[in-house]
Image: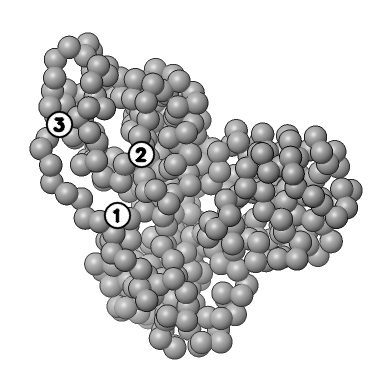
């Protein structure tokens, strides 16, 4: 069964410019929006449609954003829950969140032509899991139970992985051998919460090893750092992103933790409510790592109609990382190297 078509934004009355809120302004966080892994994955589906024609099947949402999914469906992508819903011999794209070896094997058994759009930073964590399992370490995987990325990573070494869902769970986890334990993490978590979980794990297991390099992705960290700086001066923070996007949900939490008086997540500008703006002078705006910039611009346009026309960008880092496309998509049908073999499009 294909996945349900996401909601199309509704039309509503424009936000009103109500006097009495003082000097109205927007603090626009940067970096925000698309990261390199998301960009690569979305381009991979677009290129697969260009190269092989519709339909191209995608296991799960290619990235966690309903607007992106809707746009790709309109172009001919069909999103499914599992590979057994894909006709034998068809092209299937694995999402940016990664898959377990069992999914790869199931696709091969069905004769599917698989294109792996897993973010390279997620692939790095998979390789760490394989290596530590080979050395017989118990892996404490910090992440959210049921999240696709966690399922994929745990599937690399199911007999060696224990999922730690929260800092409180760190106080109850039991391990076989406290001298051979290592932690890894989902790439899209809150940096602060992850470090608190590690602190509590290490208090119980002093020989706990760290991963070779930080598992939380650069984009997740950069967006959290930027919203921390914005939040301290914001009466209201609006985060553009979908409910199933871990990094978008985390941005709301981080904004509240670091001083925002209120913070809300929206998929579309039409979800911003007039009541949120009552008495608000400064609005912070950001977006999750799977959000196209057009959705942020729509929010800014609506805020401008409500009098928030003074927009100040708060930049805390520069991002120029790009990832090559999956090998199947680096050339065109004639074998010529494609202009976008190295992923990337303009983004904030």
Q: What residue is at 50 percent from the left and 26 percent from the top? A: 257
Badge 3 marks a residue whose secondary structure is loop
Q: Measured from the top left, where is residue 152 in percent x and y? A: 59, 63
Q: Residues within 10 Å of mark 2 (few under 14, many from 20)?
A: many
x, y (%) of residue 112? 48, 83
| Image quadrant containing the N terminus | bottom left
Pick whichever of labels 2 and 1 is earlier in the sequence.
Answer: 1
Residue that label 2 marks? 265
**In this orientation, does residue 34 appear?**
no
In this view, the mark in front (3 or 1): 3
Q: Residues within 10 Å of mark 1 (few under 14, many from 20)?
A: many
The answer to whether 107 is drawn above or below residue 291 in the figure is: below
In the image, which is nearer the foreground, mark 2 or mark 1?
2
- Front-lying residue, 67 or 31: 67
Q: Which residue does the image show at 22% across and 27% down from the upper left?
A: 275
Q: Is residue 209 above or below residue 227?
A: below
Local SS, label 2: strand
Residue 75 figure quarter: bottom left
Q: Which residue is mark 3?
A: 15
Which quadrant of the view contains residue 273?
A: top left
User: Circle 1 — which element?
Assistant: helix
Counting residues from the start of the chain, the first of labels 3 and 1 encountered is 3
Q: Which residue is mark 1?
A: 67
Spatial CA span between label 2 and label 1: 14 Å
Task: In the rendered view, tell whether residue 1 sits above or below residue 70.
Answer: below
| Residue 55: quadrant of the picture | bottom left
Q: Is residue 180 left or right of residue 159?
A: right
């Amino acid at each position: 069964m294909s996945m349900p078509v996401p909601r199309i934004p509704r039309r509503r009355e424009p936000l009103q410019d109500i006097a009495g809120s003082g000097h109205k302004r927007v603090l626009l966080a940067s970096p925000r929006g698309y990261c390199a892994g998301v960009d690569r994955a979305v381009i991979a589906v677009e290129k697969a449609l260009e190269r092989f024609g519709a339909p191209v099947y995608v296991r799960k949402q290619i990235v966690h954003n309903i607007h992106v999914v809707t746009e790709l469906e309109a172009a001919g992508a069909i999103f499914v829950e599992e590979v057994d819903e894909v006709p034998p011999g068809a092209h299937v794209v694995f999402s940016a969140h990664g898959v377990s070896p069992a999914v790869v094997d199931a696709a091969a058994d069905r004769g599917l032509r698989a294109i792996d759009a897993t973010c390279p930073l997620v692939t790095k964590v998979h390789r760490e899991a394989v290596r530590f399992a080979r050395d017989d370490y118990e892996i404490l995987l910090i992440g959210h139970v049921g999240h696709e990325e966690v399922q994929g990573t745990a599937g690399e070494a199911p007999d060696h992985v224990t999922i730690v869902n929260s800092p409180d769970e760190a106080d109850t986890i039991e391990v076989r051998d406290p001298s051979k334990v290592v932690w890894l993490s989902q790439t899209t978590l809150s940096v602060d919460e992850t470090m608190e979980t590690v602190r509590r794990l290490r208090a119980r297991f002093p020989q706990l090893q760290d991963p070779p390099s930080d598992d939380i992705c650069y984009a997740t960290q950069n967006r959290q750092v930027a919203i921390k700086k914005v939040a301290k001066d914001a009466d209201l923070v609006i985060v553009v992103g979908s409910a199933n996007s871990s990094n978008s949900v985390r941005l709301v939490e981080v904004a509240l933790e670091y001083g925002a008086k209120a913070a809300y997540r929206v998929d579309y500008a039409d979800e911003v409510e007039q009541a949120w703006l009552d008495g608000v002078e400064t609005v912070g705006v950001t977006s999750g790592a799977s959000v196209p910039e057009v959705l942020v611009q729509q929010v800014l346009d609506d805020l401008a109609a409500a009098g928030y026309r003074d927009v100040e960008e708060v930049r805390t880092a520069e991002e120029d990382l790009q990832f090559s496309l999956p090998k199947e998509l680096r050339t065109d049908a004639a074998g010529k190297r494609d202009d976008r073999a190295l992923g990337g499009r303009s983004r904030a």
